[in-house]
Image (cartoon, coloured by chain):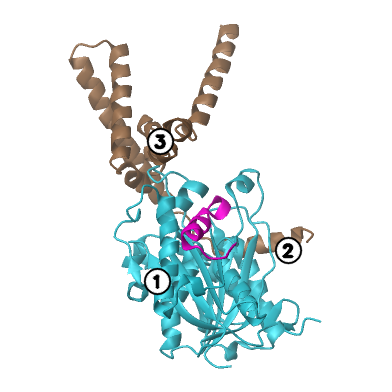
Chain colours: A cyan, B brown
Amino acid sequence: MAEKKLGTQTVKFKNPPSIIAGGTIVGPKEGEGPLRDYFDMILVDDTYGEKSWEKAESKMFQDAVNLALKKANLKISEIDYLLGGDLLNQIISANFAARQLNVPHFGLYGACSTMTEGLTLGAMLIDGGYADYIIAATSSHFSTAERQFRYPLEQGIQRPFTSQWTVTGAGATILASTGEGPYITHATTGKVVDLGMKDANNMGAAMAPAAADTIITHFKDTGFTIEDYDLIMTGDMGRVGRDILLELLYKEGYDIESKYKDCGIEIFDESQDVHSGGSGAACSAVVLNGWLLSQIQNGVYKKVLFMATGALLSPTSSQQGESIPGIAHAITISTTL
Amino acid sequence: MERDVKKEQEYKNIAQKYEPKPALLKNVVMAFVVGGLISDIGQFFLNFYLSRGYSMQDANTLVSITMVFLGAFLTGIGVYDDIGKFAGAGSIVPITGFANSIVSPAMEFKREGFVFGAAAKMFTIAGPVIVYGVSTSIIIGLIYYFLK
């Protein structure tokens, strides 16, 4: 009998882990955005002094972990597990960073939902008594994602208005079995939902049904209402995805608009020519570990539903005419128990 | 999960409502202006080569070589993608766009080596154009041969 399970897809932690530190590193474009003051490190050069963008991304992943460790005043040898992933084939950014970090490592792939996938599993490992310290981390890089999923950078093409801009950056969160909070109290694990969207330039539309499904399930499973939360934040729906998500939820009787924000919309200014907004595994990771954690620590928000959202496509599946499945994992972050 | 076609159609209608429409008129005008300008530059070189005493056939070849060089050069210094952003088809259709489609992947994939990186990836976009361009001209050539 799973005593910590609530409803169909949610767990309530008995010993909720504390978020004790977050580390962030972002690229130059993100460093010009509205959230620039909340990041630990802003790169001047998006190759980070490396020979390839893939190497730069892996180095960012590693440094986000190191920044978080420094803030928590911990050594990597004190960490029980690293739960990390990114968008590249065979999750090379995370795996190659783990090669340097010398720590037990679970590699995850949840596309842009990886941040909350890692936090959910990390919280479960701690609550289950298998670990005292966990690091969950993800990265993405505009240039590595473009060359894997789309076109060469210097190709002279127009990006559609529905397209999103992959965030260059990496974010790492350290969870601890003991601490003063903020706590991860609940986690709702999403189902893969696919309503047949095929446009790889419109990820917001592909992910919105999964996002709506996880939010509705979370409210049903926990019995929480919208009023219980100060903020409901998604990972990278973008402007197009936000509008669709709000309508889908409204139709089901959930009007979350007044409490709602999206990392992909917050991280860039409209003048930065990113069209629908930011995306990528790092989008939710840097906004959570940079802006949101500082807002929670400053008492602006006391209880937050944070949900990273992923579009589970590959260039192969798109070329073979497959539709784009979406997934979304939600966690409750609360300053009180 | 079984696919629910009705639900998918309903969702498609909702999603379409929020899809921003491309600025069609602006795109068409920009494509016309920039495409026209690129053609003007080509014409300028054609006139120039003819004035230097080259035959029409030689001058045509020289114009192609010059325009391919310009497209490749502007790609190399990182300008062609900025032109393409507002020109759209205006800078894709002319021969300079063809040069851009070969040089841009070659630049990007040279890190994977000169053989399986730059050389192999060079034709990922241009390759299909060559394959179907050559195939079409052969078919048309055959039709012309038999109907003549």
Residue A123, compared with residue B47, is above or below; it is below
Which percent across, then down, holds residue A120? 61, 74
Q: Which quadrant is the C terminus of chain A positioned in? A: bottom right
- C-alpha distance separating marks 3 and 1: 36 Å
Kindly identify the amino acid type of the residue bearing the numbered disc 2: Lys
- C-alpha distance separating marks 1 and 2: 46 Å
Region in magenta: A87-107
The furthest residue to the front: A77
Q: Is residue B8 left or right of residue B118?
A: right
Give the image quarter of residue A223.
Answer: bottom right
Q: Secondary structure at mark 3?
A: helix
Chain holding disc 3 = B
Packing grade of label 3 (10 A; few <14, some 14-19, many >=20) is many
Q: Secondary structure at mark 1?
A: helix
Residue, disc 2 = B7
Residue B106 numbered tag: 3
Residue, disc 1 = A67
Kindly identify the amino acid type of the residue bearing the numbered disc 3: Ala
A110 falls in the magenta region: no
Mostly what secondary structure, the magenta segment? Answer: helix
Q: Is residue A47 left or right of residue A13?
A: left
- Residue drawn where x is 67% and y is 49% of the image: A322
Which percent across, then down, holds residue A272? 35, 62
Of callouts 3 and 2, which one flags the residue occurring earlier in the amino acid sequence? 2
